[in-house]
Amino acid sequence: MNWRGMQTLFRKELLRFYKVGLQTLAAPVMTTLLYLLVFAQALQERVQVFTGVDYAPFLLAGLIMMSITQNAFANSSSSLIQSKVTGNIVFILLTPLSHVEFFLAFVAAAVVRGLAVGLGVYLAAVLLVPLPIHNPGWLVLFAVLNSAALGTVGVIAGIWAEKFDQLAGFQNFIIIPLSFLSGVFYSIHALPDFWQRASHLNPFFYMIDGFRYGFFGASDIDPSISLAVVVSVFAALVTLTLWMLRSGYKLRN
Amino acid sequence: MHPLTMTPAINIQSVHKRFGSVNALKGVSLTINGGEFFGLLGPNGAGKSTLINIIAGLTRADEGDVAVLGHHVVRNYRQSRRCIGVVPQELVYDPFFTVREALRIQAGYFGLGRENDPWIDELLDALMLGDKRDTNMRALSGGMKRRVLIAQALVHKPEVVVLDEPTAGVDVELRQSLWAFVKRLHRDGHTIVLTTHYLEEAEALCDRIAILNHGEVIALDTTQGLLERGIGRTLRVCVTTAAPVTGLTGKYAAKIVRQAGNRLDLQLERSSDSVVDMLDAVRQCGATIIDLSTEEADLEDVFVELTRRKKA
């Protein structure tokens, strides 16, 4: 392993988002807090969630996970598309970094950005909405796994997209709809049967439901099932990404 | 003997590459020796950049093998990439970082840490970027960005340096300072591979030259060897009359390449055409010769002739 090379790429990816922290850290925290204020006020009395859990903390837990996943995706995907479009991806491709080192560095940086934004949302919102932590182990496990999974999707999207427009399409037509329809704003038990069953086909549902279990000790489905689904999806994504990187798909012509 | 001459710096064997229906490289084979200053020339679309990208590992060949200092560029990519530094043709940079950060990051990819800082400082000074080390890349002029690209290619001290049209769009002063630096690298034992559209640069700098056209090597020789390839020389004659010299016939008439006013340019074959016979023929037309000069074929003439022959 080229450990130092991998650490350098990881550090470079951290520096990249840290240098524009207002845009990459502060802005998503602010946006998520606005979601919380508006939706918690509007829907507090109208949406039934878990027994003994108020809507505002339920929503906050979902919003934290949504901000983690969206920012993990944004980090790796935007870095790659920018590097490809501007051409500076050659600085990485000319080096002795392996495809595994490339992958680990990008995904690790995406995890850090996702967790940093999630923690920022938690610390800012917990002043307004009390949010107990029932099981920190599940919480951390899902936070890391989910951000790694979306960081991996970001690598796939960043490699696949040839222009910013295609990446925006990937985000607006796949990532955001799946996030919004995953139960961030509601419990799927409040949905009609068809939409409940449809929600079970959405991997984001398992990501958010398992994460909520860490806060409340309650969830729509057994958290071990959520964990198994998330691990399986992540494994499939890793396999696909490593194949893309190893074959040089859209990177090495 | 130069230590690098034991193993070829770059060994290219039967490399093919297609992009869709375009056959970019059609079985290119080349050996570039250690310590050489090697020129890779060809018209636009000849396959030069494709070949360089394959050597650098940026593109994968469909068939054939390439090795840098004996390390296969795909199977032993880690070793081959440690041995080679590539200055890309495009003026690319990462806008998030300063010059020094960009160079430290590039060195880090090769496993080098702060112990490499003295070499980075040396490079910055040699490339006249010392006072720009803490300047963001976005704030540099085009010429400075080009120099940073050269520093990035050299940051891991590669034995083989590939410069893909490094002086494209660069002003004369910077071009001369870049060549002075590249010559220094060559003196220090680096193998230099250069592509350029400025053929006079290749003629002045390169020991050996390959000319690529339509994905094939159409000439591979020492620079002197190429210049002596019988392309000939131009005989320029000034006569007293501004009227056209009309009396030349047969083989002599076929030698006229240009006639303007009282000036006549004649293309002579190096081995078969006599200057004296040619001048006699002009005199027999009634013209009085008042001045004459001969001009040897330069690399540009050779290049044009070879690529034209191939088209024909």
Image (spheres, grey):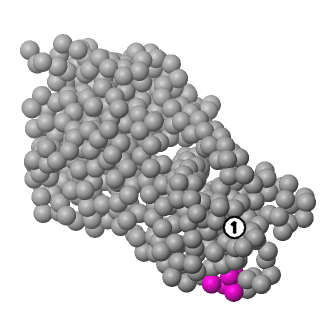
Q: Which residues are drawn in magenta?
A: A37-41
Instruction: Please tell me whether residue A118 is drawn above or below residue A160 in the rendered image.
Output: below
Q: Chain of mark 1?
A: A
- Residue B248 is situated, as x and y percent measured from the top left of the image, at 33, 27
Instruction: Please tell me whether residue B248 is drawn above or below residue A157 in the rendered image.
Output: above
Instruction: Please tell me whether residue B216 is drawn above or below residue A171 in the rendered image.
Output: above
Q: Residue at x 80, y 63 (%)?
A: A188
Report which quarter residue A239 is drawn in: top right
Q: Nearer the viewer, residue B107 or A162?
A: B107
- Whether the magenta-drawn stretch holds residue B35 is answered as no
Q: Secondary structure at mark 1?
A: loop
Q: Nearer the viewer, residue B287 or B118?
A: B118
Circle 1 residues within 10 Å: few <14, some 14–19, many ≥20: many
Hey, what amino acid is under mark 1?
Val
Q: Nearer the viewer, residue A43 or A158?
A: A43
Dot 1 corresponds to which residue? A184
Q: Residue at x 70, y 73 (%)?
A: A53
Q: Quadrant of the N terminus of chain A?
A: top left
Q: Is residue A165 visible?
A: no
Report which quarter residue B247 is drawn in: top left
- Whether the magenta-drawn stretch holds residue A39 is answered as yes
Instruction: Please tell me whether residue B115 is drawn above or below residue B74 in the rendered image.
Output: below
- Residue B285 is situated, as x and y percent measured from the top left of the image, at 27, 30
Q: Is residue A128 visible?
A: yes
Question: Would residue B164 appear left or right of B205 to someone viewing this image?
Answer: right
- Residue B80 is situated, as x and y percent measured from the top left of the image, at 31, 26
Q: Residue at x 64, y 65 (%)?
A: A216
Q: Residue at x 14, y 32 (%)?
A: B186
- Residue B216 is situated, as x and y percent measured from the top left of the image, at 44, 22
Report which quarter residue A241 is drawn in: top right
